[in-house]
Image: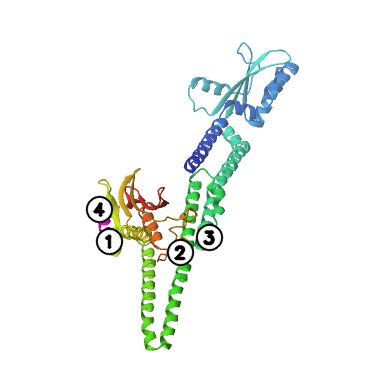
Amino acid sequence: MRSLFWRIFASFWLAAALVAGLSMLLGRALNQDAWILSQHPALDGLAETWTRHYEQQGADAAQAFLEQRRKAFRVHVQVLGDNGQPLVKGTFPRRAAALEARQAHDRRLPWRRLSVEYSSPRSGESYLFIYRIPHPELLAWHRGSLLWPLSALGIALVVLTLTSLLLTLSITRPLNRLRGAVHDLGQTAYQQNSLARLARRHDELGVLARDFNRMGARLQGLIGSQRQLLRDVSHELRSPLARLRVALALAERAQPAEREKLWPRLAQDCDRLEALIDEILALARLDADPGPAQPIDLGALLRKLEEDARLSAPQQRISVRVATDAQLRGWPDMLERAVDNLLRNALRFNPAGQPIELSATQEAGELCITVRDKGPGVAVEHLRQLGEPFYRAPGQNAPGHGLGLAIARRAAERHGGRLLLENRPGGGFSASLRLPPNAAAGA
């Protein structure tokens, strides 16, 4: 992964190193003998011109040329031959030469001494030129010759500016896209493809965009499911309310004998409406904060559900099996409601005389609470839709509103697990709550 941290760190580190290195190079360049010899106007072409005067016009012309250069640039020059003796008088005073000889190791001399050897292309003779430039003159020339260093510094600043601009844009532009996505999400107009390009990045911003996409999809799914639930609730409530309204209208116009026949129907519709509202509230409570998780005694919970089922369906047989290693932390009321719904579904479709299996075991590192019946099962094409609110498979005339499996599925999800529904190979139907060992951690 190309980490954004290392990109920023490397950019600032390289920028600092470049500025520091350039400053050091400029400082050294300004004080190098070669730089002064090649750039100082007093020394430009001096050796070549002096050699031509000396070899063609004699020593006096060569000396006059040195005097002229001294007056123009205040630079003193000595020229030595192969034997080390001066070829002309030069412009360096004897008193200054004696001072330099006495303080040969003193770097605080009032001038800078430079030397260069020049070979004449005409005669082949070699001459040693010794230049002495006073420090004030050298400093004045330095101040006037900073065009090239300043140009180099300007180029470095431009490069640093462009680098900083690119780095800044690589951070702020993705953040602006994320800000726009947050705004769209708040307006419920979020589109996942708006961050598709950003999500392909291989740095922290790409990870953030991918996480944001998942969060946006999850929130959109929740909003869509809430809207669908409201539509389904309004549809389901409309039917019993319409029946109640019709029954009341009939009761108002009916004779006392006929009215007595309508009261059980009214009571039945009221009970159905109450049961529907109770299931809707149970489904809604699953999205609320359930409080702290606690250990669940699975054996006691399943035996209690078995006793309740025996009272409501005494003709059915239920076998309960709880493994000794089946342990769970979670919310007992939520889990009891989920398993009770699965058990009631099994009781509706299981033929009399056939046992219903209720078990809690450990399988593949998961806690598996399973309800198995010997009923007709469900067509394969409808298995995927089971567990959606208010959905009931076609051909099932059993009472209910299609919320029992939805409650069981949501309870499994709150425990960090899932609801698995499948037809049994030998006939019948199996509903399993598969929960992780530490189920409450998945909430």
Q: Residue at x 47, y 57 (%)?
A: 385
Looking at the rendered image, the disc whose residue lies closer to the viewer, 3 or 4, is: 4
Residue located beneath label 2 in the image: 226
> Local crowd at mark 3 within 10 Å, few (<14), some, or many (≥20)?
some
Residue located beneath label 1 in the image: 310
| Residue 366 inside the magenta-drawn segment | no
Q: Secondary structure at mark 3?
A: helix
Q: In front here: 6 or 66?
A: 6
Labels 2 and 4 touching (C-beta < 8 A):
no
> Local crowd at mark 2 within 10 Å, few (<14), some, or many (≥20)?
few
The C terminus, quarter of image: bottom left
How far from the left and from the top, in percent, is residue 188?
Answer: 51, 62
Side of 328 where 174 appears, left or right: right
> Local crowd at mark 1 within 10 Å, few (<14), some, or many (≥20)?
some
Residue located beneath label 4 in the image: 299
Q: Which amino acid lies under the numbered mark 1 shown in the image of this protein?
A: Arg
How far from the left and from the top, in percent, is residue 46?
Answer: 68, 24
Side of 179 where 411 appears, left or right: left
Badge 1 or badge 2: first in the primary sequence: 2
Labels 2 and 3 touching (C-beta < 8 A):
no
Q: In front here: 256 or 405?
A: 256
